[in-house]
């Protein structure tokens, strides 16, 4: 994998497509959390200074178009950015005065998610190189992720390089003192991480729906708590009686539903966290949006206070940490990837990284 920072000479005076990550949450017409856009600053500055032209391409899941948040994006990434509403307008941008552009939401065109080679060709036309700075989509086989690198020389941007370095550190660290914390919902994306990491870790601590699934599988009466439909399939291959696998022993319950881990479980988890050397955490311990935040608060505080290297990720995990009021600087590394982080930690091959020539192991 070629890191663009080490190959700046190769893009001097060239026209570069930058697969950026501007997929931010939006509330009442404004960016609710700018951290993903903030993380694009380095790559944009690097290309603005070295390339002749830079076209940012990204999707947004929150809006149809970048239009309503363009002003905010420009105030973070540069007022010189011109908005390009459709791929048809790219040739004009390439011959025009403007140095930096942003194409509208890639997912407005079906070729993006279908990974249509024709769409990749349209995007790549007139460009000399491609930089992927969107780690959060690297688990997607989309045109802007794995299609364009088949056409143009491809480089990893600083975000992708940094994510790979940090997440690799989690995989490669010695098992002694490694603590994996997994909560939240969507167990099908979370349990593979436990399966991949538990043998090389001291403990895996669980909360949220992931823990509900395991409790149910162990025959505990969890009432009408939220569980995954196909939990047997999801948990297949995980030893649910493994001593390293910690599940809640008490919980906060309402209307016959487990909605958070209990006080004793929180204390026990905090104790294990305090002894850790490396911690990776993805997924809230409870339904924090509904006010069941104490378990997540206890874990967040313990992780933030720990002297270990701490790695966190997940959209809801980060918003819970915001809600609790812990600054993100308290953690060693905050991943921009939700699904991509989980896929990487589960040991999967990510199409976007493979396209950059990254193969693990
Ligand atoms: P992340 O975005 O950090 O990866 P997820 O999307 O997997 O996290 O999960 C977060 C969601 O899980 C939140 O909406 C949260 O309310 C929900 N959740 C956590 N614990 C429970 C629970 N016990 N019952 C129902 N929902 C829960
Ligand atoms: Mg989420």
Image (cartoon, helix red, strand yellow):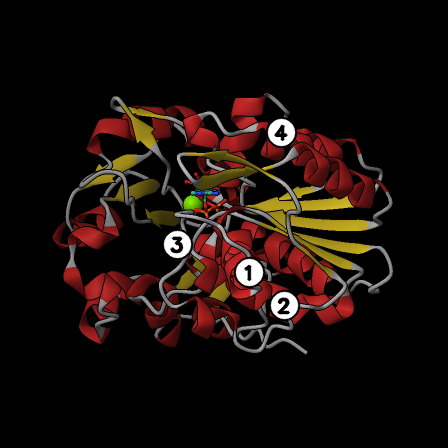
**Residue position for label 3:** 19
Question: What residue sits 39% from the left and 34% below the top?
Answer: 255
Q: Nearer the viewer, mark 3 or mark 1?
A: 1
Label 3: which secondary element: strand
Question: What residue sits 33% from the left and 71% below the top?
Answer: 147
Q: From the viewer's side, name the closer residue of 327 and 291.
A: 291
**Residue position for label 4:** 297
Tell me the distance, in whole angstroms, between the alpha carbons under discs 2 and 1: 7 Å
Badges 4 and 3: C-beta atoms under 8 Å apart?
no
Q: Quick one: label 4 or label 3, which is nearer the N terminus?
A: 3
Q: Nearer the viewer, mark 4 or mark 3?
A: 4
Q: Quadrant of residue 341?
A: bottom right
Badges 3 and 1: C-beta atoms under 8 Å apart?
no
Residue 219 position within the rendered picture, expressed as x and y whole percent measured from the top left: 54, 63
Q: Nearer the viewer, mark 4 or mark 1?
A: 1
Label 1: which secondary element: helix
**Residue position for label 1:** 214
Residue 276 position within the rendered picture, expressed as x and y whole percent measured from the top left: 83, 48
Q: From the Cβ of disc 1, is ligand 1 less than 8 Å away?
A: no
Q: Quick one: label 2 or label 1, which is nearer the N terminus?
A: 1
- The quadrant of the image that shows the N terminus is bottom right
Label 4: which secondary element: helix
């Amino acid at each position: 994998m070629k890191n663009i920072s080490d190959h700046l000479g190769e893009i001097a005076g060239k026209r570069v497509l930058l697969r950026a990550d501007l997929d931010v949450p939006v509330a009442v017409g404004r960016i609710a959390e700018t951290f993903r856009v903030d993380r694009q600053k380095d790559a944009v500055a690097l290309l603005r200074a070295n390339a002749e032209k830079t076209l940012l391409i990204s999707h947004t899941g929150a809006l149809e178009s970048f239009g309503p948040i363009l002003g905010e994006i420009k105030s973070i990434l540069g007022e010189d950015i011109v908005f390009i509403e459709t791929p048809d307008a790219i040739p004009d941008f390439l011959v025009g005065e403007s140095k930096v552009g942003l194409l509208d939401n890639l997912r407005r065109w079906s070729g993006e998610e279908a990974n249509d080679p024709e769409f990749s060709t349209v995007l790549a036309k007139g460009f000399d190189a491609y930089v992927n700075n969107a780690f959060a989509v690297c688990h997607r086989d989309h045109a802007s992720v794995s299609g364009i690198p088949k056409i143009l020389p491809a480089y990893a941007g600083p975000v992708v390089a940094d994510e790979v370095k940090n997440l690799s550190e989690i995989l490669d660290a010695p098992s002694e003192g490694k603590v994996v914390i997994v909560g939240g919902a969507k167990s099908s994306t979370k349990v593979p991480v436990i399966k991949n990491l538990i043998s090389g870790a001291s403990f895996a601590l669980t909360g949220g729906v992931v823990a509900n699934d395991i409790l149910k599988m162990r025959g505990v009466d969890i009432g009408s708590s939220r569980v995954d439909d196909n939990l047997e399939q999801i948990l297949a291959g995980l030893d649910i009686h493994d001593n390293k696998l910690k599940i809640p022993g008490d919980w906060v319950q309402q209307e016959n539903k487990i909605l958070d881990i209990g006080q004793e479980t929180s204390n026990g988890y905090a104790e294990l966290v305090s002894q850790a050397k490396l911690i990776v955490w993805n997924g809230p311990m409870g339904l924090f949006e509904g006010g069941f935040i104490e378990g997540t608060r206890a874990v967040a505080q313990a992780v933030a206070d720990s002297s270990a290297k701490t790695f966190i990720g997940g959209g809801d995990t980060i918003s819970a940490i915001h809600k609790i009021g812990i600054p993100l600087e308290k953690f060693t590394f905050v991943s921009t990837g939700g699904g991509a982080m989980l896929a990487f930690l589960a040991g999967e091959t990510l199409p976007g990284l493979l396209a950059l020539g990254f193969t693990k192991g």
